[in-house]
Amino acid sequence: MPPANTPVLLGKVAGTHGIRGQVRVVPYSGEETTIISLSSILLQGPDGTLESFEVANAVAHGKKVLLALRNFESINQVLHLVGRELYARRNQLPPLPPDEYYWCDLLGLEVATVDGMTLGTLADIIATGSNDVYVVRGEREYLIPALDDVIVAIDLDAGTMTVSPPEGLLDL
């Protein structure tokens, strides 16, 4: 597990909202509740540095989050924030129930089947309407549905995920 103060990428400022200094954030995980729970955020500047901002208010707005940052009261004050990626410190993230994971913990896991066939590394996650899809890259790319009957085990300490793919999923 990464250190408590490690920055975790959560989304991106997609635009402004209204004239009172709010920004529209697109969560990368498709889950806005984590961003809404934050009292402060980090935004990556053009030079790659992370700058801290206090959150005055955050609400869900469809599949996006509207953020009001403390001391920003007009659209002109937040225009320069559009396009920046949004991070939070690891220790700011709310605890998860058993058998739920943050995407940042899953990316990079080595994925193998229950039969011991190595598929590759979990390289990306696609949020869909019904379930996430894990993009596993090795000798080829596999799209693994994140379903309870497909994902058999996740061992973060060992850095592994074991899957039982449905018939035909691994066929060329």
Image (cartoon, grey):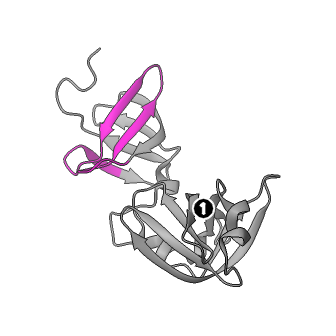
* Left or right placement of residue 75 versus residue 169 in this view: right
**Is residue 42 shown above or below 141?**
below
What residue span does the magenta drawing correspond to? 127-153
Residue wearing tag 1: 8
Q: Is residue 150 magenta?
A: yes
Give the quadrant of residue 140.
top left
Residue 149 visible to the viewer: yes
Quarter containing the N terminus: bottom right
Please name the residue shown 65% across and 58% down the image: 82
* Left or right placement of residue 60 versus residue 7 in this view: left
* Left or right placement of residue 157 versus residue 128 in this view: right
Return the x and y of residue 165 as percentages of the image width and height: 24, 34
Quarter containing the C terminus: top left
Please name the residue shown 67% across and 76% down the image: 74
Return the x and y of residue 100 as percentages of the image width and height: 35, 63
Q: Residues within 10 Å of mark 1 (few under 14, many from 20)?
A: many
- Label 1 secondary element: strand
